Image: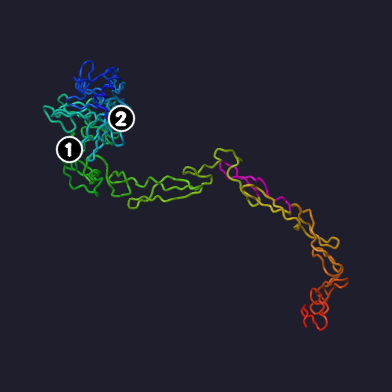
Amino acid sequence: MTISRSHLACALAMLALGCADSAGPDCPQGMIVDGECLPFDCPDRDCPDGYVCLEGLCAEILCLEVECGDGSICLGGRCYAENCESRTCPGLGEVCVEEECQPASCLGKDCPEGQRCAAGECYPVDCPTKYCPGYGEVCVEDECVERSCVGVDCAEGHVCAGGRCYPADCQQMGCPQGQVCVDDVCQQGACIGVECEAGYRCADGWCYPEDCPEETCADDEVCDSGRCVDADCVGIDCPPEHRCEDGACIQVTCPEPCTLDLQCQEADCGGWMLTCLFDPLGGVPVWSDSGDVCSDGDPCTQADRCEGETCIGAPLCDEPPAAYCDGDTRVYYAAVGTCVDGACDYGESRVDCPWGCEGGACNDDPCVGQPDGTECGERYCYGRIFRKRVCEGGACTGFEQIEHCRDGEDCTDDSCDPLTGCHHTPWRDGTVCGDAICQQGQYVAPACLDGVCEGATVIDICGGNEHCVEGEGCRCGESGQNCAGTDQDYCCVIPGPGESGCYDITSDDAHCGYACVNCGGGGTCRDGSCVP
């Protein structure tokens, strides 16, 4: 829905003046205030919505009945400082908001990035073909315009400055570009009425230092980018092979063309010292009397600037991807990457984080600021010793023993688990857990019982023709009988009393082999086996 200016004016007038009907047939292009028809636009300028023309100037409806004190001006029905601390705000309808001079029509207007408000609307800060360096300038139809002059239509021979119309030339002389005639004297239009704080002078609408740190400037100069510059030339953008003097561009002749190879070199151009620089708008090197922009021809650099007689660019690959965490591993990239054909490669590096990784960074050692002996980190096994990590000197490098997993029992398997500590697994009952002994004709060994070596198990029971030998077990023959030292080197066991004894079991036909087999009639014992 579109609201007409008359309806908007009526709504604002009701807020400001309490009137019921501000427009009528006798005032179709304005509003009636105190019986007087106030038009929406002035003869020489268009007023923003919410304004009317009062005494030849645009006046905000909400401020028609507001009276502000000295040094203040009404804006949006409220009083604001007329001037900033660092400079005055001489532009028509300007006030100081957050230490910046702004048109009253732009209060609360939020413009996109790269744009600035003027006359209640958003305009580009710069033009497609040139910069707009003046204080508060905007681009209107490819021309840089002081924003308090947007919408102002001056009579022929006059130009706008600070929202007011001035003669473009004085009676006795013409004024250079950017200047107007005030009291028959040419003055910078952007600086009319601007008063800077002590030690500063206005140029192109801005307040510049009167002197440079290492140089005292003349009365008609200011310090710009560390060097003294004609105040009338600040903001003047001269074409190539020209320089600014008294606010005007004058053509000069240089001994040779400015080329990429000559960048940052100075030359005497008809008495003027110019520097070969790079014009980013034109994309070519040019002779210039100010600035330091150059091009080193390297696609892997940016913000190229002259340093002495050398063009140096900042590395293009200085914005690596953000580090991140891959589990407990930190993944990060080099601060300065390698540029190849304009593409950046930062390389990937990985580092394990002992204390975990969060937000692309390794967590700090948990012992920072903690007393010695404070447990830190995970518990662990050192062989069959269960340990915990403790703080030592502000770092988690110490350890203390929690438990030794050897329980001294022969009938358990002792082990260590880093999560649960020591474990003692009992052996199966009856498992031999010591040396066997001879006991009442039996060879008996200690055995495990419920994980303790307190039981016993019979390894062998000696027969009637056997005897028990300590450390060996049941052996054939009577106790004390020994085959060693005889020609019969082998012993065989034969069931029955008195039959076990020493025989040559390799050749005795009646006692052949360890089983003392009787080879019988016709059989012969050879090498412990019966053969026909």
Q: Is residue 401 magenta?
A: yes
Element on which disc 2 rests: loop
Q: CA distance from mark 2 to mark 1?
A: 37 Å
Viewer can see residue 10: yes
Q: Is residue 442 left or right of residue 327?
A: right
Question: 289 or 489: which is nearer to us?
Answer: 489
Few, some or many residues within 10 Å of mark 1 (<14, 14–19, 20+): some
Element on which disc 1 rests: strand
Q: Is residue 373 left or right of residue 4?
A: right
Viewer can see residue 210: no
**Residue type at tag 1:** Cys
Query: In the rendered image, which quarter is residue 428 located in?
Result: bottom right
The answer to whether 322 is drawn above or below residue 461 in the figure is above
The answer to whether 130 is drawn above or below residue 339 in the figure is above
Question: 262 or 516: which is nearer to us?
Answer: 516
Q: Are marks 2 and 1 in contact (CB under 8 Å)?
A: no
Query: In the rendered image, which quarter is residue 509 located in?
Result: bottom right
Question: Magenta part of the protein: which range?
Answer: 385-409
Magenta portion: prevailing SS class: strand
**Rendered image: mark on residue 109:** 2
> If you read the primary sequence from the N terminus, does the residue marked by circle 2 or circle 1 appear first?
2
Q: Is residue 388 magenta?
A: yes
Q: Mark 1 — residue?
A: 249
Few, some or many residues within 10 Å of mark 2 (<14, 14–19, 20+): few
How far across and down, in percent of the image, does residue 28 sit? 20, 23
How far across and down, in percent of the image, does residue 435 sit? 78, 59
Q: Is residue 514 left or right of residue 78?
A: right
Q: Residue at x 41, y 46 (%)?
A: 321
